[in-house]
Amino acid sequence: EPEVTQTPSHQVTQMGQEVILRCVPISNHLYFYWYRQILGQKVEFLVSFYNNEISEKSEIFDDQFSVERPDGSNFTLKIRSTKLEDSAMYFCASSQTGVETQYFGPGTRLLVL
Amino acid sequence: KNEVEQSPQNLTAQEGEFITINCSYSVGISALHWLQQHPGGGIVSLFMLSSGKKKHGRLIATINIQEKHSSLHITASHPRDSAVYICAVIRGSQGNLIFGKGTKLSVKP
């Protein structure tokens, strides 16, 4: 069964460093999402991406964040200058249309020291 | 105020019990997801529904659009059902989800 994959599974970084989180969505899906979950809190929407551009973003997704689909398979989230409060689990998800089941990747646990 | 409210926050049940988790939302939605999150953190979609009722194995999900309310039922609960169950709603056509805080279910043998 097709699945969404994410790399790395864990990342530890120093405050102020740039990180890139990678996702490979399911191949025939057209809508891509990043969510994050701070430890002990609910999952929060960051950004949605369709037709090679951001379709919607939350207030969390400020200028420090960017997304890219550099080729036909990868979907990346870049945090330009990490802060302590960026420590969280980051989930990538994809769906075929905007109102269909979303398939989640296993997550990347980011720890900023 | 959260746009998506779940109850209860925590639920402990004995194996075999019938379980109900409730979700209320305060915004207009296109559809609603029920998701399962295991202790390792992975999230799996159980149901997506926009009206009526869906059933998959021992799981049943219902939604009442007029009352802005959905329920997830688990029949004949089993310890392997222990997880966090999350209600999330879709607003608009882009699919981004607004999540509830989740219900932590523990089923004792």
Image (spheres, rainbow, N blue to C red):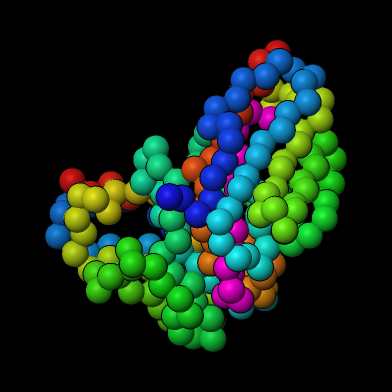
Viewer-proximal residue, B103 or A35? B103
Image position of B72 with respect to B97: above or below: above
Q: Is residue A73 left or right of residue A46?
A: right
Image position of A1 with respect to B73: above or below: below
Q: Is residue A99 left or right of residue A110?
A: right
Q: Is residue A6 visible?
A: no
Magenta-span inclusion, residue B83: yes
- The quadrant holding residue A1 is bottom right
Residue at the image point whose x is 72% and y is 58% from the top: B66
Q: Residue furthest left?
A: A16
Q: Position of residue A37 (x, y in %)?
A: 41, 49
Image position of B56 with respect to A70: above or below: above
Q: Residue furthest front?
A: B67
Q: Position of residue A110 (x, y in %)?
A: 33, 50
- The quadrant holding residue B52 is bottom right
Residue at the image point whose x is 17% and y is 52% from the top: A14
Residue at the image point whose x is 53% and y is 81% from the top: A50
Magenta-span inclusion, residue A26: no
Viewer-proximal residue, B39 or A1? B39
Viewer-proximal residue, B39 or B64? B64
Q: Which residues are magenta?
A: B81-95
Q: Position of residue A99 (x, y in %)?
A: 67, 70
Q: Is residue A46 visible?
A: yes
Residue at the image point whose x is 19% and y is 64% from the top: A81
Q: Is residue B49 left or right of residue A66?
A: right
